[in-house]
Amino acid sequence: MILDGKKISEEILLEVKNKVYDLHLSLAVIQIGNDQSSNVYINQKKKLCNILNIAFIHHKLDLNISEKEVLKLIDVLNEDQTTGILLQLPIPNHLDTKKIQNRINYKKDVDGLNNINVCNLINNKPGIIPCTAKGIMTLLNKYNIKVAGKNVVVVGRSNIVGKPISNLLLNSDATVTVCHSKTKNLAYFTKNADILIAATGKKHLITNSMVKEGAVIIDVGINKIDNKLYGDVDFEKIKNISSYITPVPGGIGPMTIASLAENLYDAYILQQED
Amino acid sequence: MILDGKKISEEILLEVKNKVYDLHLSLAVIQIGNDQSSNVYINQKKKLCNILNIAFIHHKLDLNISEKEVLKLIDVLNEDQTTGILLQLPIPNHLDTKKIQNRINYKKDVDGLNNINVCNLINNKPGIIPCTAKGIMTLLNKYNIKVAGKNVVVVGRSNIVGKPISNLLLNSDATVTVCHSKTKNLAYFTKNADILIAATGKKHLITNSMVKEGAVIIDVGINKIDNKLYGDVDFEKIKNISSYITPVPGGIGPMTIASLAENLYDAYILQQED
């Protein structure tokens, strides 16, 4: 059975739209340089804001900008009426990603990557949750797939996906294994997973011999090769073995966008408390 | 082979003693109420400070003290000459543990439990690491037991042990599985572990049928029953199956104390940077 991220995300966007349409929210996206993938992702965010009637402000900064200048911009956005601030990754190497993310007011941190939100997630306290991880949990939830007590294997340990989804799953009582590029015998772990989450950025890393019959397969990969999108999972070979599987595109991608919409509303609510 | 935490901890204490003896460092321990186990642990810390020539200040506060009063004390300790501040757990339910831990200046947070140190650990950046987790890594390291690429199973997901050791192991390229009270078929996971770390507080939860021949067994449990100490691992039954195993007492307990000594020195160094 296909986990239809596109359909579920549309339902969520409609819900969020009803809540935010008249609130005059705004999203500031900070891009540094002109990365081509970033341009695509930023365009998706712009479209999202159009749908939700959220003002979209694109700060496209020079590749050689100093850290001080970036921090100064964030200080301004922290203080003004901006609802959400998002640092589009990757940023150039001369800048400290964590330092910049931590400068964003945690109540405007719609990516959920600043230390306060990261720690809230670890401590199982309310906060803003990274979009992709949140989207995965929402999708599982919408299809009534329980994670408590399940053997969940996460392949990938990035700060953006692997680590936050592992913590969310642990908070929801899953038994969680984190695999990565240094894991020996990856198939041993994936073959025993009740739920397998692949977030590696390696086209078709997960093949049919690596999954258990009846497993739930979540594919976070978006690998663009010769203008075509591929997941981390070999969908065609696995779809008949698994009980549920996300397609690429149309799976976790749109769920990530829907989570950003939810995070913008959550940020607004948090700021209302002040 | 026994992993002799007592011997290794003595070596570490000697090293730290040579560095700190003439520095006039100080440790403030905040205890709220009169928990009997806390009294024992605080006494160990007092002895440690005597050995290292570190001033030991015990703030024993009333069980009914307000959060505001506790925070006020921490504000004073943050500003004065105190090197390390430690909130002895558990504290009464009317107080917010995380809020109080986060009030401690992260450079004096010798327990490594405030958000900044927790996030530094997750982001694999330098910081103060929770004592027990640090002690486990040091012990493995001293016996030249490599974790990279190993299947490491951690039983327990506490903020004090389970979560920090999992993150440390992940940073060191282990494949990490976190099991806990809601895990189904715990033995399936433990039986396949190259390295098994038990931190549950349940006497002899891990029995001989649950471990793989030749595995490394780390027992964090300190369960006092009828005035006798028991680990989470059934040591007598497992010692001949495992390749390495920590005893209780004399394993991770003394390593935790040794790590506190190291953290006090690290805190001093961090404060020197100001």
Image (tube, coloured by chain):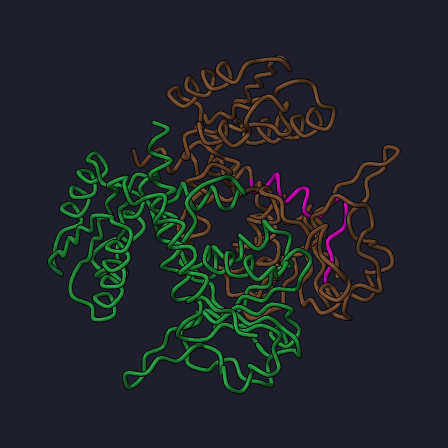
Chain colours: A brown, B green
Quadrant in the picture for residue A215? bottom right
Q: Check residue A205 for magenta coloring.
A: no
Q: Check residue A248 for magenta coloring.
A: yes
Please, is residue A103 above or below residue B136 in the view? above
One can see residue B112 in this view: no
Which quadrant, please, contains the C terminus of chain B?
Answer: top left
Position of B62 with respect to B23 (left or right) is left
Q: What segment carries the magenta color?
A: A244-259
Quadrant in the picture for residue B46? bottom left
Q: Nearer the viewer, residue A223 or B245?
A: B245
* Residue shown at the point (78%, 71%) measured from the top left: A213
Which quadrant, please, contains the N terminus of chain B?
Answer: bottom right
Q: Position of residue A138 (x, y in %)?
A: 57, 53
* Residue shown at the point (27%, 41%) measured from the top left: B22
Q: Position of residue A151 (x, y in %)?
A: 63, 68
Q: Nearer the viewer, residue B201 or B22?
A: B22
